[in-house]
């Protein structure tokens, strides 16, 4: 199947990743741990842009940028340098942003996603380093706000901006690209994606016959998918009515699910880029070999290895590697019990229960899941009871044996089931007669009665077999 893309949709994404796992900001010694702090408490003359303050490059930020580039299959440039991008906005007191221009640190990469028609390559144009501006807090909505507050705690945080080619053909592909990116960045341990503003997206969207519009500053993957969907509909409707889609910058109103025009797009020349005289160029090609050595196993490679090493299904491998913590968790469990059985319990059952509760895998221990799977393997509890144990531990805590004992989940022995079968037959004469008269459905009812008598601890298949056997005579 080849995806035709009937509307000629083209989506390119610029993703700003905040390197909040670093100890200090991009060009000063201020702490990056401001997320719970009072406004304007993590600032200094450098990140406040006071006259005469001199920046110093954070070496670890540069290393992280190279690491990210390598993980995105990019080439590392030989020599890189910073530029000043000149513009004034209240969140940028210096009057320019320190960023990169014609020598971005890495470029020319690619990410493979699951596209509309199977594997789909999204090309990465470049990724460059820059500093985050401060944060504007509008009182009320951005359109009607009567005032704006500024918090400079974020000012000067190290950012990597990852720019893709317009290779995505639908909102869904854009979402999958973002998920994949997040997945890779999690593996690299360069940022904490759970923190507010750690990944912000600008989406360039166009349809056939129109120019592109850029939707700025979308804060979630789901938001990006919605914003792009809205933008495609807006542009298509505009063109259908004979209008023109102009190049402009738009804002996504997350609450209303619409995009709003902000300004016509400025060209590069408006920014008067020039080399940052306070920072020397860096010959980063020399750093690359050592950094490549340290690169961890990435999602695609891990998925392939799990399949070959543990003989699990592609679907399970995908589910497990979509979160590195789950993948690590699985490998501990797989070392203790049959890896294929472990795959089903971790990828299907446990992950499903965690997702339902919006919990991370840290909420469960490998010891507990191993114990639960063993109880099923030793025929001590039914699979259904095992799921119940997992749910109970997630909701109320406790150990597997505590829950099993408390809820009386130990599987009942054969003679108890036999007894329940005899009782059921004695007490349900009408149903028995119906069954003997050829009404198969009545057997289901009788099985249900046996299960009820054993409080669900009998094996339903065994109960059915015993009933059929008993009713033969
Ligand atoms: Zn500072």
Image (spheres, grey):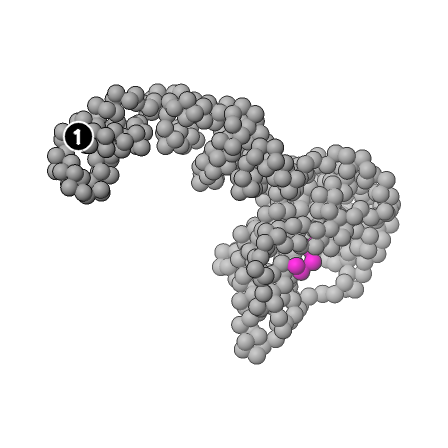
Q: Indicate yes or no: mark 1 CB to ligand 1 under 8 Å.
A: no
Residue 425: image location, x then y, percent? 16, 30
Residue 165 lies, with reference to residue 374, above or below; the image says below
Residue 467 position by quadrant: top left
Residue 130 lies, with reference to residue 407, above or below; the image says below
Residue 422 position by quadrant: top left
Residues 59 and 445: in front is 445
Residue 277: image location, x then y, percent? 87, 50
Residue located at (41% from left, 26% from top): 376
Residue 79: image location, x then y, percent? 86, 47
Predominant SS along the magenta part: loop
Left or right of residue 361: residue 76: right
Label 1: which residue?
473
Residue located at (45% from left, 26% from top): 373
* Residue that lies at the very extreme toward the front in this rendered image: 473
Residue 267 position by quadrant: bottom right
Residues 358 and 280: in front is 358
Label 1 Cα neighbours within 10 Å, binned few <14 / some 14-19 / many ≥20? few
Residues 280 and 177: in front is 177
Q: Which residues, given as a range, are shown in magenta?
A: 163-167
Q: Secondary structure at mark 1?
A: loop
Left or right of residue 440: residue 378: right
Residue located at (56% from left, 64% from top): 231
């Amino acid at each position: 199947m080849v995806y035709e893309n009937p509307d000629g949709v083209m989506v390119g994404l610029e993703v700003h990743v905040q390197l909040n796992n670093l100890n200090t900001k991009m060009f000063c010694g201020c702490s990056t741990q401001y997320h719970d702090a009072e406004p304007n408490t993590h600032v200094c003359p450098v990140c406040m842009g006071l006259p005469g303050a001199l920046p110093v490059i954070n070496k670890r930020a540069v290393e992280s940028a190279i690491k990210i580039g390598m993980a995105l299959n990019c080439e590392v440039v030989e020599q890189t340098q910073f530029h000043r991008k000149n513009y004034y906005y209240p969140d940028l007191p210096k009057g320019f942003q320190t960023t990169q221009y014609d020598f971005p640190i890495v470029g020319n990469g690619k990410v493979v996603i699951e596209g509309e028609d199977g594997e789909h390559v999204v090309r990465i144009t470049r990724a460059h380093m820059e500093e985050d501006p401060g944060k504007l807090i509008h009182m009320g909505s951005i359109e009607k706000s009567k005032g704006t507050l500024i918090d400079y705690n974020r000012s000067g945080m190290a950012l990597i901006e990852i720019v893709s080619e317009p290779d995505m053909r639908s909102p869904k592909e854009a979402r999958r690209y973002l998920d994949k990116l997040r997945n890779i960045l999690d593996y690299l341990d360069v940022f904490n994606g759970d923190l507010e503003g750690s990944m912000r997206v600008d989406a360039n969207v166009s349809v056939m016959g129109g120019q592109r519009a850029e939707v700025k500053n979308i804060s979630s993957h789901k938001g990006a998918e919605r914003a792009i969907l809205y933008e495609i509909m807006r542009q298509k409707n505009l063109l259908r009515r004979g209008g023109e889609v102009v190049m402009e910058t738009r804002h996504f109103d997350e609450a209303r699910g619409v995009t709003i025009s902000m300004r016509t797009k400025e060209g590069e020349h408006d920014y008067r880029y020039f080399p940052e005289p306070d920072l020397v160029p860096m010959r980063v090609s020399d750093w690359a070999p050592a950094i490549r050595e340290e690169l961890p196993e990435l999602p695609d490679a891990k998925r392939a290895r799990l399949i070959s090493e543990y003989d699990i299904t592609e679907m399970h491998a995908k589910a497990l590697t979509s979160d590195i913590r789950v993948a690590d968790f699985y490998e501990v469990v797989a070392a203790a019990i049959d890896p294929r059985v472990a795959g089903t319990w971790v990828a299907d059952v446990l992950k499903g229960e965690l997702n339902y509760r919006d919990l991370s895998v840290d909420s469960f221990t490998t010891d507990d899941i191993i114990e639960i799977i063993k109880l099923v393997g030793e025929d001590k509890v039914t699979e259904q009871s095992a799921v119940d144990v997992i749910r109970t531990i997630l909701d109320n805590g406790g150990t597997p044996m505590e829950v099993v004992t408390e809820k009386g989940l130990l599987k009942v022995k054969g003679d108890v089931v036999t007894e329940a079968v005899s009782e059921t037959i004695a007490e349900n004469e009408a149903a028995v007669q119906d069954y003997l008269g050829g009404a198969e459905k009545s057997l289901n009812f009788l099985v249900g009665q046996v299960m009820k008598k054993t409080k669900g601890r009998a094996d339903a298949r065994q109960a059915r077999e015993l009933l059929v056997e008993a009713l033969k005579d």
